[in-house]
């Protein structure tokens, strides 16, 4: 069965991203497929490269990256929610003539259309909220 996930909670204030990763482990053990993950609301903080440098959150950031690399799951981040919270990728930083960015692959800033597309590709879609 193909699954998609929606993560709405920040790693420093919610159990949602931790629960999502445990759920993904269970999916793989049962032989299911993960199509992708969409991060929205405060869940966009999971994509911050700065999170990857802050104990104890660096392990969580690394787990998201490994999940994408090892299993091909997309890590889509709502661009509007991210920018409202000060998260931008290198492309957006260049467009705004900034010399910094804090979102990097395998996380991708995308629009809400990616969320709809993910929902349409999956047989099951699960939300993890605070």
Image (tube, helix red, strand yellow):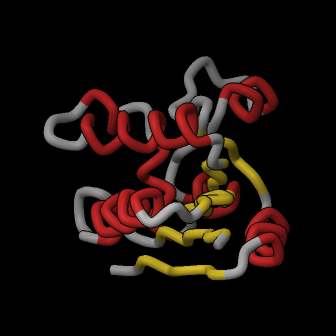
Give the image location of residue 30, x and y in percent.
44, 66
* Image quarter of the C terminus: bottom left
User: How many numbered markers are drawn?
Assistant: 0
Q: Residue at x 65, y 24 (%)?
A: 98
Residue 130 versus residue 64 in the image, above or below:
below
For residue 10, say whether it is visible: no
Can residue 89 be seen here? The reply is: yes
As drawn, the residue found furthest toward the left would be 56
Q: Which one is in front, 114 or 28?
A: 28
Q: Residue at x 62, y 69 (%)?
A: 4
Q: Residue at x 61, y 60 (%)?
A: 33
Q: Quadrant of residue 40?
A: bottom right
Q: Is residue 116 left or right of residue 104?
A: right
Residue 50 is situated, as x and y percent measured from the top left of the image, at 36, 32
In the rendered image, residue 6, in percent from the top left (x then y), is placed at 55, 71
- Who's the residue at 56% across and 22% down the image? 100
User: Which residue is the extreme one toward the top?
Assistant: 99
> Left or right: 88 with respect to 59?
right
Front residue of 8/1: it is 1
| Viewport quadrant of the N terminus | bottom right
Specify whether 14 is left or right of 102. left
The image position of residue 91, as x and y in percent, is 76, 29
């Amino acid at each position: 069965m193909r699954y998609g996930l929606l993560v709405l909670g920040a790693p420093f204030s919610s159990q949602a991203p931790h629960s999502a990763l445990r759920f993904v482990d269970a999916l793989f053990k049962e032989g299911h497929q993960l199509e992708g993950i969409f991060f929205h609301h405060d869940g966009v903080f999971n994509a911050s490269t700065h999170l990857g440098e802050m104990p104890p959150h660096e392990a969580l950031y690394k787990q998201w990256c490994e999940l994408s690399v090892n299993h091909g799951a997309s890590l889509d981040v709502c661009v509007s929610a991210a920018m409202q919270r000060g998260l931008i990728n290198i492309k957006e930083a260049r467009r705004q003539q900034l010399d910094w960015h804090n979102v990097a692959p395998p996380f991708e800033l995308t629009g809400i259309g990616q969320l709809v597309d993910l929902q349409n590709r999956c047989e099951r879609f699960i939300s993890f909220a605070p």
